[in-house]
Amino acid sequence: METADTICAISTPPGEGGIGIIRMSGHLAHSVLKDIFVPKKKRKTFLSRRLYLGNIVDPKNNKDIDEVFVVFMGAPHTYTKEDIVEVYAHGGYATQKNILNLMMEHGARLAEPGEFTKRAFLNGRIDLIQAESVLDIIQSETDEELQNAIGHLSGRLSEKLNLIKLNIKKAVVEVEALIDFPEEDIDVDIKNIFPILKQTKHLIKKLINSYYEGKAVKQGFEVLILGKPNVGKSSLLNALILKEKAIVTPIPGTTRDLVEDSIHIKGIKIKIIDTAGLRNPIDIVESAGIEKTRQRIPDADLVIWLLDNSSQFTNEDKNIYKRIISKRKIVAVNKIDLPQRLDTHELSSRCLDWNEISILKDVGLEQLKDNIYEKLMEKGMKSPGAFITNERHRNALKMSLEEIEEATRLIKIDMPLEVIAYALNNALFYLGEITGETCPDDILDEIFQRFCIGK
Ligand SMILES: Nc1nc2c(ncn2[C@@H]2O[C@H](COP(=O)(O)OP(=O)(O)O)[C@@H](O)[C@H]2O)c(=O)[nH]1
Ligand SMILES: [Mg+2]
């Protein structure tokens, strides 16, 4: 496929390096190469996928720019499906810049971030999931992340989605057959598509749930330590991360900002956040800290609610509990080295289990860590395979699921077939957004802008 512009960019990271790669894609690539490259052995054209040694020379003044290797890759069997040229130059900034400028003088233009990959997508070589996985591969920090991203690039997730789409298409065909032929003429009952819809819902839900584990692999979990002032929240953060990061004092209200650090428990990344103790604030600084704490609650994957064994259960504790009733949580009673004043009935009457710990004496902390891990993984899907790590994918799956549920409901209340077909086609539309078949331009732009230039 021919795109109007031929694009070029430095594809290796900026700075000094052994080699620097400058890449061009588009129908002018070959002619630009002929203009600015003088091979050691004279030749008129460059064969596809051969490496040539020679010099980049500015034809204006015959000035040598660099001694390089070049390769020409003929369309359509290339990354972008267009003609591609890669120049392997010395890895200095000035050299690469000069070669790039020369390419631009001879008809190429500077590529936008991710534009090579965008062309691969627009020209149908890869779907949108695969394009996004290219970015994930580049940004992977751990092996688990990398393996999942490579799986997506090879089409593992796309395959699953295609299977789901096929199912929905089957249902659409049945509904449309009924629309075209009145019921007397053919032997089809609309209720026959229930099993297909049920299976489809199951498959989509499984993928949506895999986001949880996918997120664990990619970003790690967020664990928020909550509790009234002075129960030992900052001490707990320090004990978990094995550093004196947060200030610990006997003065209630010491922590006024969020303090966070990351640890690994059994290979999963966990961000622990120490917060300002929740109570009626004494001044505006504390009040701002408390507000920040409150705002973080909805996003936290887990809350550790910390109580003090040596002090009574108060209204402050009650109010904290109200805020976290529906959150995934662990209750921990700290300072068990001190005489008990806490009425644990307040916890048991709320059907809560609790961990007894003393951060000061290092009691119960290992057990607490195990609990954190188990709680976080409770909802995770243990089976290997494709899991989604991308918020965009999850949202589209949810929308699609809603449409299928809607279709099921409409069938049950005998709504017109056209309305049912409409809902099913919407479900397909949302799935198409994930792979990119039906993705609006602004979403595409936003995705590719996250790439670096030259990819
Ligand atoms: N006796 C005892 N004191 C503790 C324990 N954990 C923390 N403390 C003390 O409780 C006070 C408040 O601790 P801090 O971590 O600042 O509480 P925060 O306000 O919830 O962050 C400090 O003086 C700590 O040394 C514990 O297990 N036992
Ligand atoms: Mg504190």
Image: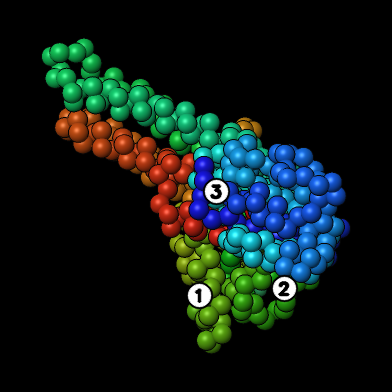
Q: Quick check: 420 left or right of 242?
A: left
Compared to residue 100, the image places residue 145 above or below, namely above
Q: How far apart are the alpha carbons under marks 2 and 1?
A: 19 Å
Question: Residue at (79%, 54%) from the top-left corner?
Answer: 38
* N-terminal label among 2 and 1: 2
Question: Residue at (64%, 65%) from the top-left corner?
Answer: 105
Front-lying residue, 445 or 39: 39
Mark 2 CB within 8 Å of ligand 2: yes
Question: Where does label 2 land, which residue?
Answer: 246
Position of residue 395 measured from the top left corner of the image (x, y, whole percent)? 44, 48
Question: Residue at (80%, 67%) from the top-left corner?
Answer: 63
Position of residue 117 measured from the top left corner of the image (x, y, whole percent)? 59, 49
The numbered disc on residue 91 is none
Neighbourhood count class around disc 2 (C-alpha, 10 Å): few under 14, some 14–19, many 20 upward:
many
Q: How far apart are the alpha carbons under marks 1 and 3?
A: 45 Å
The numbered disc on residue 291 is 1
